[in-house]
Amino acid sequence: MTTILEKDEAHSLIDRMPADATWDDLMREIYIRETIKRGLADSVAGRTKDVKEVRAKYGLLE
């Protein structure tokens, strides 16, 4: 899934970061933002699984 860059959002993200932020910090923020955005889109589209189903698949306790 490719996301169109919205310059205003990019500027806002950078402006909220501390003055000593690194490129790695910026990349992490972008990654987190995009991961959340994709997760919300999956949720809206009904592409989710019940926690019990995931736990059972990986043998995790409830």
Image: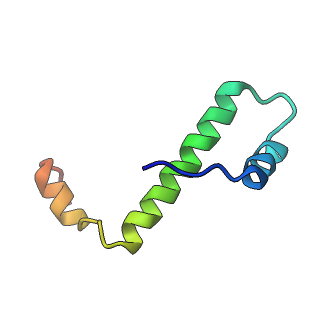
For the point 12% across and 56% down, the residue is 56
For the point 48% across and 48% down, the residue is 2
Report the number of discs: 0
53 and 38: which one is in front?
38
Using residue 35 as the reference point, say whether residue 30 is left or right of it.
right
In this picture the colour scheme is rainbow
In the rendered image of this protein, does residue 47 appear above or below residue 20? Answer: below
In the rendered image of this protein, does residue 9 appear above or below residue 26? Answer: below
16 and 59: which one is in front?
16
State the image coordinates of residue 18 (x, y, percent, origin top left): 83, 37
Based on the displayed image, in which of its 4 quarters is residue 26 positioned? top right
For the point 31% across and 73% down, the residue is 46
Based on the displayed image, in which of its 4 quarters is residue 19 positioned? top right
Based on the displayed image, in which of its 4 quarters is residue 17 positioned? top right
Quarter of the image containing the C terminus? bottom left
Using residue 11 as the reference point, say whether residue 5 is left or right of it.
left
61 and 2: which one is in front?
2
In the rendered image of this protein, does residue 48 appear above or below residue 27? Answer: below
Using residue 7 as the reference point, say whether residue 52 is left or right of it.
left
In the rendered image of this protein, does residue 4 appear above or below residue 44? Answer: above
State the image coordinates of residue 44 (x, y, percent, origin top left): 40, 73
State the image coordinates of residue 14 (x, y, percent, origin top left): 79, 42
